[in-house]
Amino acid sequence: MALLLLALAVATPVGLAQTTSKPQLAGALKNDPAREAEFMDWGLGMFVHWSLDSQLGSVISHSMDYASQKYLDRYINELPKTFNPDQYDPDKWMALAKLAGVKYMVFTTKHHSGFCMWDTKTTDFSIMNTPYGKDIVRAYVDACRRHDMKVGFYYSPEDFAFNYKHDVPARGGREIGRIRNDLIEYTKRHLDELLTNYGDIDVIFLDGGHKAELTQYVHKIAPNCLVTRGEMVTPEQRLPADPIPGPWETCFTLGNQWQYKPTNEDYKSGSQLINMLIETRAKGGNLLINMGPMPSGTIPLKQEERFRELALWMFVNDEAIHDIRLCTTAGDNDIYYTQSKDGKYVYAFLTKFTDDDPRGNTQWGRLSRKDVLLKQLKATPTTTIRVLGQEHRVERFTSRHDIGSRFKQTDDGLEISVVRAQRLYNNRRWPNAVVVRLENVEFVKK
């Protein structure tokens, strides 16, 4: 957890992160509340940042900012000629995402560079004018529907290639005003294509530029589509200090960069990823965690490994992540809480024993008992507890190992005593949170 908190503290320079204030709408149209409630059930999404400059391993799009004319000419005229993701198989993406408990995916249809990953009629700067020559967005949408994955689009209203063609600097500069109206109409044509040519789209993430105006346009042409960034609170690369009434969403990279970075990358551990998800859900939000495919379209092995560690944890504990709501307290760095939508169950995430370094001797060994004080809870006459993922009917086993879960009420709070019995790793140690489900408990009133 110390490593996670340090990573969160330095993840985003001051002034660059999205705030925790809800964006002001440019008009009367807004998200359907019923769909927002559905969004809050999902809990976990996969972001996908991928474009033609993945070939270079550069930051996505932003290498065009302050770039020389020669660099821009090569970027726009040469890079498309070598972008050929011939191993792109979105069914493989979906299989990994589903295993990890992901409920929705958000794919970069167009990042700030202006390169379109679909069969657009608005520009030649698109996937159709590459050696690959096929509509990547179409294949992505079709795969989402085959795998019952909610379909999300990322779309940037900024367009560095559009500016380049009008002799304006990538980020606009002093002359952006003379092309602003043309750019807005251009981006609306993109949304017409994206939100009418592929059936109903569940989510759109509008990043930068004139997104307030486009939010209203999305609601006009696709009223069933949820706008996240543009209408919801969407902090980036950080978590809020306090819970936020939903819906809200935070997005994180797995390493330092959104797009594929072949060298000099520093990935978060699986434990960090899991703890980020726990804290996000305890504070009422959704976690949108990024995957950056290689230029070929395949998932880098180091990223796949993190998602597979998450998959094992979610296979055991997903009921505490999906279809849940805020509790009266989120908890703290050692214990976080969520509750089922119907209020029947409270889930206590025990994150104290998740040190990545086994030499620290803080990882939870198999068949080891831990006594934990839940200061925020108190028992009732019908309280029951159990550890998620493992058998709670202890009478089915011999007395050789005492694996029963127990609790007692104290003046300081509810003291629980639980054993981690399930054998998940061969070395019998477990670096990730254990989740205890409590039925018929109450939160202590402050």
Image (spheres, rainbow, N blue to C red):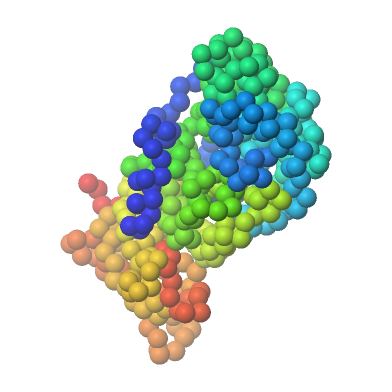
Q: Specify the farthest residue to the left.
A: 411
Relative image position of residue 40 (x, y in whole percent): 51, 42
Q: Which picture quadrant has residue 311?
A: bottom right
Task: Identify which residue is drawn at 29% across, 71% down.
Answer: 371
Relative image position of residue 89 (x, y in whole percent): 74, 52
Q: Nearer the viewer, residue 38 or 43?
A: 43
Task: Identify which residue is drawn at 37% across, 41% down.
Answer: 240
Task: Identify which residue is drawn at 74% across, 42% down.
Answer: 83
**In screen coordinates, is 109 left or right of 316?**
right
Q: Nearer the viewer, residue 114 or 228?
A: 114
Whether residue 434 is visible, yes or no, is: no
Task: Identify which residue is drawn at 59% across, 9% down.
Answer: 178
Count of numbered circles in the view: 0
- Image quarter hosting the N terminus: bottom left
Please tell me whether residue 271 is drawn above or below residue 158 in the rendered image.
below
**In screen coordinates, is 96 left or right of 428?**
right
Whether residue 409 is visible, yes or no, is: yes
Relative image position of residue 227 (x, y in whole percent): 57, 31
**In screen coordinates, is 446 left or right of 138?**
left
Relative image position of residue 396 (x, y in whole percent): 48, 84
Please tell me whether residue 194 is drawn above or below residue 387 in the rendered image.
above
**In screen coordinates, is 253 left or right of 196?**
left
